Every structure is written in C-alpha cells, then in structure tokens.
Amino acid sequence: MDFQILGIYNKWWQNGSSIDTLEKELIGQYERAEFKRNYENFFDFESNGLYVLRGPRQIGKSTLLKYTIVELLKKGERRSILYLPLDTIKDYLELRDTILNYLQFSSDEKKRYIFIDEISMVKDWQKAIKELRDNTLLKNDFVVLTGSSAWDIKRSAERLPGRKGNIKSDILLLPLTFSEYFKTTVREIPTFSIDEILSFEDKKRFELELLGPDLEKSFFKYIESGGIPSFIEIMNHSEDITPFLDTLWDIMVGDVERQGLSRSKLITVLRYLGERLSNRFSWTSGASEIEIDTKTFQNYIETLGYNYMAMVLKALDSNSLVPLEKKQKKVYFYDNAVLKNMERKLGITQRFSTVIENTVAQNLTFKFATNLDEGLCDLPNIGYWYSSEGKEIDFIVNGVPIELKYQNVINKSDLASIKSIFGKGIVLSKNKLDLSGEIKIIPVHIFLGII
C-alpha cells in the first residue's frame, strides 16, 4: 500500500488535527447515538497481546477499534497508532510490507498499537503476522485483529502459537441478548444462572412479578429491533430501515460468495431455512427437497454458521447429553433483523411464535453456549431433544430442558415430556408464572431478562 494512502487512514499522524476533531471523525456517530454499547477499558494496553476479535459484520467491531484509538489519542499517542482496513490489501506479502514500512516510520516510538480490520479478507494473513511477530519489534507491540469468519480466523490464528502474549486473546462480539438490552436501555436488574432459576422457591415470584411490566414492554421493542446496536438506533428513531437491511443482505450473500459458493444456491438454501425455521430436518432430506447434493447443502449451512449468521442446534442424547450427529438439526438466524430481510427479499413471513422461538434460541446460545469463538455450528452444551415417537423439547442447555409454550394457558400435558424424561426443567410461557414445582413456569420476557 502506498504510504500516502496509509496516512489518509491515520490522520492523527499529522499534528494539525486536534483530538476533538479526530474524535468527531472517528466516533462522532457513536457518541451521538442514544443507544450504544459500552466499549470502555475493553483491552489491556499494558500488554503486548495479540487480540483476535471475532463477530458478524455490522456488529460494531470497527467502532470498537476506533473507540479504542480515541482512548489512546487522549493518552497522547499519535504515530504509535496504526489503523489498517484490510479490504485495501491484496495479499499477505503486501500486508507484511505495509506493516514493515509502518514499523520503520514509527521506530522512535516506545510501543505501537496496531489495529487491523477484517484480517480474513487477506488469504494466508497469518504468514505475515507470524514473520513479523518473530523477527521484528512487533513482538513487543499491542495488536488487535478483527474478522467475521470464525473458520478463517480460528484456523489461521491457531498457526500463531506462543505469539499472542499473556492475555485472553479471543474476544467475541455478538448481538445483544435481551438482558444486555434491558440493562442498556432501562436499568440493571439481578441475573441468575439456569441452576439458580431451577432452585427458585415459590416466594421468588413476588420479586419477578414486580419486574414483569418493565421487562414485557422492553421485550416487545427488542423483538422488533433485534440486538445489533446500529439497527436498534435506527428503529428507536423510526428511520428508514431499508438501507441497513440492504447492506446486511449484501454482506451475508457477499461473504458466502467470497468463500467460493454460489449466490443462487445460497438463496435457495436460505429460502428452505426460512420456510422451516424452528423445525427439524436432516441434511439428506433438506438437500433432496431443494435438489442439491447433501454435502453441498450441509456446506452452505455450516458456512452461515461459521460466519455467525445462523445457529445449528443438534439433537442431544437425553442421558449423556452428547450431540447426535446423525439425527436431525434445527437452524435459527443470529438476529431478528435477518427475519425482516427474509420477508423483504424472499417473501417469507414468520408467525410471531416462531419469531419468539428464534429470539429464545439466540439468547440461550449467546449466553450459555461454549465454543462460540469457533462459530455457531458446533455447540456441545446446547441443543434440543426429540424421541422416535415425535415428542420434542425445544432446548437443552447444560443438561437443563427448556420448553417454549408461548400461550395463555399452560396445562399438565405441556409439562409431560420434561417431567417424564428429565424430572425438572423450565417452561417459558406467555404470561403464567409458577415456581412451586420442579418445573418452573416463567414468562419468556422475564426469563430472558434475568439470565
């Protein structure tokens, strides 16, 4: 990259720009927003860590980098800061040479703070980073790499053993859960683990009933907006949602195309998933229905999962809780904004109860699933259960069954599967609250607000 172009991305290298001006240019829109994620003290500047920041596109990774740069500018740093967007770099050799030029330029600095955005845009990027961490002063510097593909980033980052510093290097940004949304927009309330909720005594219902009205009001707003901060801001101001949703669609399709897959096949797969949202299916049956090869069908869905666009939940064994790879899967989308796009682009409108279920799947996954830094395909501690007789429990989280019954009346029959197979669990209702038995019945807006 031409060094003059690099200077355009790093205006703070010129002493003429004031901190206030740079702050407005970098994060002015973030600061003006009524709804914003808290990015304070996100990184340890004292370390020489190499952070790997993952998450779907449009979730706020670039905003976090720019917020962090402003923090450093306020500490007096200038030429020690490099911001490099990787959609401008053609290959890892150019990446290496660009950073080498910057290291020479900033050789008088005691320490550098390097932010490389969308690193997975460059094939074999780890070759450049490994070489520079091994053989230059970059080994003493603070580095943040961002990417949207768990597969590309994870596979490449694993080739950097011993080069990430003594920090927790993997960071994941995902859409906000409802409890995070409520905390940001209304107030803080106590949160509980699944096991703590299972141990609630009946008198706990009084406290939960007091929380109910505020949680329910916010929940319906959250259902509409989803958990992507910039989209929440658009919805709060009743602005035209079309530009954002068009960008989101183009990113989803473009990222899959960039991995060598077909746009037309992707849209066929998305249509299939949209029409069967929350329903189980096998790789073989899905592929047969849309007339493509089974491995190809699986590849498209897993690519969506590795790119943090869709969650693949597997059936779990009721005794061992091990995922049963040969049994049917269920797929949900990572944010309700995708459901709006499915309606706009493909004409698929979801029932409200299905939107609720998609929301519950998102929240349980983001809150409790392990292995999230590897994408949303392989989630060993969250799934669902079904029997050969057709009985089904919507979610199993850390061994606890959670069934969604978004209806006005909860009957004994609605508890039967949980009671006979697991003995205890949680039923998420529309408005019924009953903590007296082994199976806790809790309105879905209260449950998602307190986890």
Image: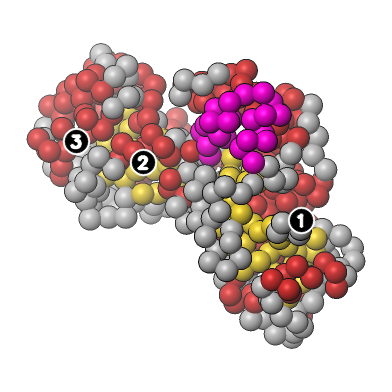
Residue 249: x and y, percent? 62, 26
The numbered disc on residue 378 is: none
Measured along the vertical axis of the image, is residue 435 above or below residue 234? below
Q: Secondary structure at mark 3?
A: helix
Q: How far apart are the alpha carbons under marks 1 and 2?
A: 37 Å
Q: Quadrant of residue 444?
A: bottom right
Amino acid type for the residue under numbered disc 3: Lys
Q: Is residue 267 magenta?
A: no
Q: Earlier in the sequence, mark 1 or mark 2?
A: 2
Task: Single out the residue that lies furthest toward the right.
Answer: 409
Can residue 388 be seen by looking at this rendering? Answer: yes
| Label 1, residues with CA under 10 Å away: few <14, some 14-19, many ≥20 | few
Q: Amino acid at mark 2?
A: Lys
Q: Mark 1 vs mark 2: give the one in front.
A: 1
Q: Farthest front residue?
A: 388
Residue 390 badge:
1
Identify which amino acid the numbered label 1 is placed on.
Answer: Gly
User: Seen in the image, is 26 located left or right of residue 114?
Assistant: right
SS under mark 1: loop
Q: Residues within 10 Å of mark 2 (few under 14, many from 20)?
A: some
Marks 2/3 in contact by CB < 8 Å: the verdict is no
Q: Name the mark nearer the viewer: 2 or 3.
A: 2
Q: Which residue is mark 3?
A: 130
Q: What kind of secondary structure does the magenta stretch mostly adopt?
A: helix
* Residue on which disc 2 sits: 154
Q: Residue at x 67, y 34 (%)?
A: 286
Q: Closer to the camera: disc 1 or disc 3? A: 1
Q: Are marks 1 and 3 in contact (CB under 8 Å)?
A: no
Q: Quadrant of residue 341?
A: top right
**Magenta part of the protein: which range?**
282-305
